[in-house]
Amino acid sequence: MTRFLRPNIARMAGYVPGEQPRDGGFTKLNTNENPYPPSPRVKAALLEAVTDRLRLYPDPMSAELCRAVAALHRVEPGMVLAGNGSDDLLTILTRAFLGPGDAAAFPSPSYLLYATLLQLQDGRPVTVPYLPDWTLDRAALAVPGLKLVFLANPDSPSGTAMPREQIAQLAETLDCPLVVDEAYADFAESRFHAIPLLTDHPNLIVTRSFSKGYSLAGIRLGYLVARAEIVEHLVKVKDSYNCDRLSQVAGVAALRDQDYLAATRSKVLATRSRLTNALRALGYQVPESQANFVWATGGPPARETFQQLKDRKILVRLMAYPGYPEGLRITVGTDEEIDRLLEALHQIGESRDRRTEPPPTR
Ligand SMILES: Cc1ncc(COP(=O)(O)O)c(C=O)c1O
């Protein structure tokens, strides 16, 4: 029966999400979840929402959530579309803008899902390497016929971000939609946020996630902000009920507790800075991160270190990209979790030193 598959589906490998170990006991620093729980208001709202009304379909347009998003970003509610995680929105966008053979561009190294979404559409990927200062050569993106550009800002795995002016310049250069994937924007300084650019740049589309800053990866909720005339068409592409009742309730409660977001954010940023300095002191190269993770390359062999950490029940993400040495992408955990990681890295380094020391001379 597989001969009936579209050839591009038969050919592709499929996206491999980060490991979610079934047995507990792991210090989990591999998929950029927030180490702090969601706002207590989220739990209270969810408990209240668990009623007989769950037999009814949810609001297909997540209207209350979209109004809360619109109020937060000072945009019109018609400019907001909710999704089952920001991945759902990236899927909707790819389906809406790309057909077989169409070209879409994204930087490298970046979020691996973009390539998978393109393969699903049988599209043509154009990868544009980041410059050494983690900006992009706009000329490299001036590809005739381009239908869509993805830019993760902050980027994963690097954690680096391009400031708003550069995104504006990029949007001006392009003759196609520019999707700025801001899954990690809650941890970035506001000068990296692109939503204010929507007034002057109609080809801009910004996606956001509740998984990271709002600690709701288990709920699956995200949103995008774009010109209303684009959103109107995207609605046709989404599943009818793409966000369930409980997600919508959780999202509204989370958005309404901005103080809680600010408090957990500042703890994550303090730990991020400590982790960055400690890794650099261990000999790793770590770009300045605007996200809730850091990317460490150039230190002791990454693959071996990844496994040795895993043996000690510490899970980080081993990342390999063409043109870069293998590296470790490490989520910013609690201070205790990061202490555990650093202690393990010290031990691993010491045992490696002992192994490589020359034998004593007589
Ligand atoms: C760059 C980037 N965009 C989007 C996502 C997906 O986020 P969500 O959980 O909202 O689907 C991730 C998840 O790790 C990510 O790294």
Image (cartoon, helix red, strand yellow):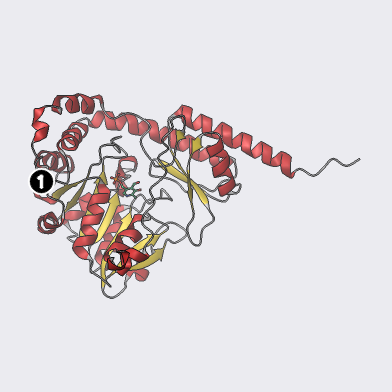
Q: Which of 105 and 12 lies nearest the eye of the viewer?
A: 12
Q: Quadrant of residue 247?
A: top left
**Image quadrant where one finds the C terminus:** top right
Left or right: 306 in relation to 228: right
Q: State the residue lying farthest toward the bottom.
A: 144
Q: Quadrant of residue 352?
A: top right
The amino acid type found where label 1 is placed reads Met
Question: What residue is at 49 percent from the left and 35 percent from the top?
Answer: 274
Q: Which of 117 and 97 lies nearest the eye of the viewer?
A: 117
Which type of secondary structure does the marked residue at label 1 adopt? loop
**Image quadrant where one finds the N terminus:** bottom left
**Number of marks drawn:** 1
Q: Which of 205 and 360 lies nearest the eye of the viewer?
A: 360
Mark 1 close to ligand 1, CB under 8 Å = no
Figure check: 221 above or below 256? below
Q: Tell me if I can see residue 105 in this picture.
A: no
Q: Quadrant of residue 190?
A: top left
Residue 47 locus on image (x, y percent): 18, 24
Q: Tell me if I can see residue 195 in this picture.
A: yes
Left or right: 21 in relation to 243: right
Q: Residues within 10 Å of mark 1 (few under 14, many from 20)?
A: some
Figure check: 24 above or below 300? above
Residue 335 locus on image (x, y percent): 46, 29
Mark 1 lies on residue: 61
Q: State the residue lying farthest toward the front.
A: 1
Left or right: 6 in relation to 284: left
Residue 324 locus on image (x, y percent): 51, 58
Q: Which of 137 and 36 lies nearest the eye of the viewer?
A: 36
